[in-house]
Image (cartoon, grey):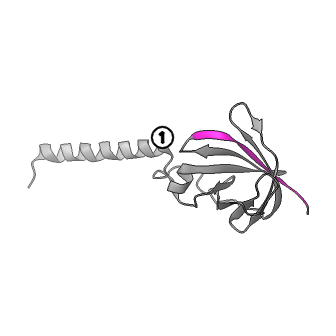
Amino acid sequence: MTAPRSRDSLTVMKRLLAVLLITASALLGTGAADGLGAGTADAAPSTIVPGKYRATQALGGVTIPLPASNARIVGRMLYLDYYGTGAPNTYTYALKPTKRGMTASLFGRSQAGQWVGHIDFVKTPYGYRGTSYAYGPIAGGEVILRKVRR
């Protein structure tokens, strides 16, 4: 049988560990605290709208515009050409639906691949607007996918 004093210290350690895990989860956004609180009913992912798009990219804080690219979404894949020239599937991004749009990554749908580089897209009336990230939270520019009729 354990002494009352050691049982109290064990309870304190368990509570401290729980508080640390919840705090780390909230700060890092890892999802260990997902499902707690209100608002989890509308957490269903949005649908990805397939079709042809015109992709415009702007890099850096100075917003250097790059030439427009042709893009198409088929299933859970995004295909981009190289600035309007070349093969239509030069860049192949894996798509993952989110609450407000989708996440695209050249390195697959895994968390490690998305940490290396991804684009967080938000659904807009004209298509999608996204921010590109590299190596975690480092923003690299903006990407706009505008729906076209062809």
Q: State the residue at coordinates (28%, 47%).
A: 14
* Residue 145 belongs to magenta span: yes
Q: Where is residue 54 in the image (x, y as percent from the top left)?
A: 83, 53
The number of numbered badges drawn on the structure is: 1
Residue that badge 1 annotates: 27
Q: State the residue at coordinates (19%, 44%).
A: 8
Q: State the residue at coordinates (69%, 32%).
A: 61
Q: Where is residue 5 in the image (x, y as percent from the top left)?
A: 13, 43
Q: Position of residue 104 (x, y in %)?
A: 65, 56
Q: In this orientation, does residue 1 appear?
A: yes
Q: Is residue 77 above or below residue 68?
A: below
Quarter of the image for residue 67 reads: top right
Q: Which amino acid does label 1 sit on?
A: Leu
* Residue 107 belongs to magenta span: no
In front of the other: 108 or 40: 108
Q: Is residue 44 above or below residue 142?
A: below
Q: Please state the extent of the stretch shown in magenta in the rendering.
A: 138-150
Q: State the residue at coordinates (50%, 55%).
A: 112
Q: Going by the image, does 1 lie left or right of 63?
A: left
Q: In this orientation, does residue 38 appear?
A: no
Q: Position of residue 1 (x, y in %)?
A: 8, 55
Badge 1 density bin: few <14, some 14–19, many ≥20, Cα 10 Å: few
Q: Going by the image, does 67 lie left or right of 16?
A: right
* SS for callout 1: helix
